[in-house]
Amino acid sequence: MNELIQFLARTAPALASIVAGPIGGLAVSAIAKKFGVEDTVDAVTKAVVEDPEAALKLAQIDLDKLKAEYANTADARDMQKIALQQSDIFSKRFTMYLTVFWSVAAAAYVGFITFGVIPENNVRFADTILGFILGTVVSTVLNFWFGSSIGSKEKGEALRK
């Protein structure tokens, strides 16, 4: 597996991070399908290393993944553009209202967790909810309004080249 990840890191960086991560099995399956081999790490590694056009095939998988990510972002931006063209003030400002609501809710919850007294039996629940709010809600709101780190990653790679 290590040999596969090293090869992917050189040819398809986005795929390498997926294979090395928790959903690596799905990425290995996608690569196996692209190369027409058995769905095992050993078979995929052998196929990738022995195929002279491996970099091209892997780059295609990488490109398909990036296209899907950009299409998702474009849909969110288009939704906001259409909402801003409506005459209904609530529709125009819905994402702003939603952002304010979750920002206030997150700040209130963090304040309560920090300064409030939590019964000992409920500490795990409080921690789980805090993780959800900070890891999902706040990051989603920030990504919607300010974009994700994909652009920063690409700029860094371009500067390195």
Image: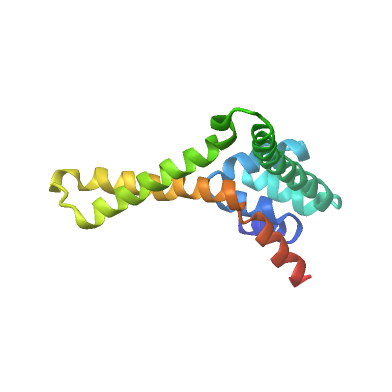
Q: Is residue 142 left or right of residue 157?
A: left
Q: Is residue 114 left or right of residue 92?
A: left
Say if 118 sits above or below 151 in the image.
Answer: above
Outermost residue on the right side: it is: 52
Q: Is residue 79 left or right of residue 64?
A: left
Q: Is residue 97 left or right of residue 112?
A: right
Quadrant of the drawing holding the C terminus: bottom right
Q: Is residue 74 visible?
A: yes
Quadrant of the drawing holding the N terminus: bottom right
Q: Quadrant of residue 149?
A: bottom right
Say if 119 sits above or below 5 in the image.
Answer: above
Outermost residue on the bottom side: it is: 160
Q: Residue at position x 33%, y 48% from top? A: 130
Say if 159 sits above or below 65 in the image.
Answer: below
Q: Is residue 6 visible?
A: no
Say if 161 sits above or below 140 in the image.
Answer: below
Q: Residue at position x 59%, y 34% from top? A: 92
Say which of 30 and 97 sits in front.
97
Say which of 121 and 72 sits in front.
72
